[in-house]
Image (cartoon, rainbow, N blue to C red):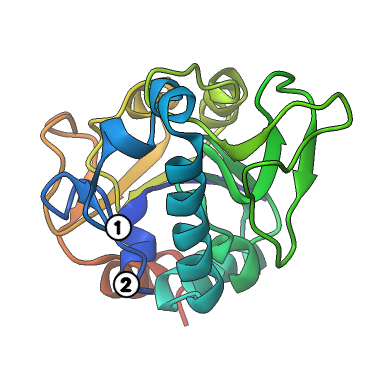
Amino acid sequence: MKRCVILSGSGVSEESGIQTFRGSGGLWEGYKLEEVATPEAFERDPELVLRFYNMRRKAVREADPNKAHHAIARLETHFDVMVITQNVDDLHERAGSSKVLHLHGELLRARSSQDPGYRVHLGQKDIFLGDLDPAGNQLRPDVVWFGEEVPAIAEAAGIVEMADILIVIGTSLVVYPAASLIHHAPLDCRRFVIDPCIPGSIPLGGWDCIQKKATEGMNELLKELIPE
């Protein structure tokens, strides 16, 4: 069975009503990233940061997977599929994708602010000031903030190196190191990119470009990859 690797970004979840950062004038729900998405912000005002991520978590819980998420999951009927996502929501999993690697963490999990190895799934809970790990350290969202390392990047690169098909969807490919993953694809790998604005970093030649939103683009790609 051929190996199909999906590299997904915020453009996939946008059609489920999840607001993107880069597509909203540099703001998330009216906040600048420096206020809510850096280690310095958490140190300066942890209550504000926790409140912001509780709002984001609520938005994710209220959202449903869209047709692009379901189309990606459907690929598993014909391919060995691995989804590498920059998104911190769980919409790929809820749509049925069985193998998902979250590069930038998961919004529905918490981790210790001092011990990165301590993680807990939140279920329907949120995180508040005073929620502590067993050692007494404040819990924080289990997401990768700007300025932090991406622990899963080496694993992701290894997955892309084994791809027979690479599908890049809903990402502007401007956030590193995630954007560098496309360069790990084998020379004989079929490459597709789906986005209304094809990223300028996509090399000329060697890519099939579908200049459409995620839902429409995945519908078109399914017809090519899974003939009736």
Q: x%, y% of residue 95? A: 59, 72
- Residue 155 against residue 103 in the figure, above or below: above
The disc label shown at residue 172, or none:
none
Task: Residue 178 in the image: state x and y as whole percent.
Answer: 39, 28
Q: Are marks 2 and 1 in contact (CB under 8 Å)?
A: yes
Left or right: 147 with respect to 80? left
Left or right: 51 in relation to 79: left
Residue 86 seen in this snapshot: no
**Position above or below: 88 against 95:** above
Residue 122 in which image quadrant: bottom right
Q: Nearer the viewer, residue 204 or 197?
A: 197
Q: Name the secondary structure under disc 2.
A: loop
Horizontal side of 211 relative to 191 (left or right) equals left
Q: Is residue 105 left or right of residue 18?
A: right
Identify the residue shown where x is 74% and y is 20%.
115
In-front residue for pair 164/46: 46
Mark 1 lies on residue: 11
Q: Which mark is residue 15?
A: 2
- Residue 213 versus residue 30: which sits nearer the camera? 30
Q: Would residue 136 be seen by someone viewing this image from the given angle?
A: yes
Q: How would you rate the neighbour count of disc 1 (Cα within 10 Å): few for under 14, some for 14-19, many for 20 or more?
A: many
Rounded to the nearest angstrom, the CA distance separating label 2 from label 1 is: 7 Å
Point out residue 149 in the picture as x, y percentages from the top left corner.
Answer: 50, 16
**Neighbour tally class for label 2: few under 14, some 14-19, many 20 plus, Cα within 10 Å:** some
Q: Name the residue type under label 1.
A: Gly
- SS category of the residue bearing label 1: helix
Q: Residue at x 58, y 67 (%)?
A: 73
In the rendered image, the residue lying farthest to the bottom is: 228
Q: Position of residue 4 (x, y in %)?
A: 54, 47
Residue for point 43% across, 44% down:
48
Q: Amino acid at mark 2?
A: Glu
Q: Is residue 187 above or below residue 105?
A: above
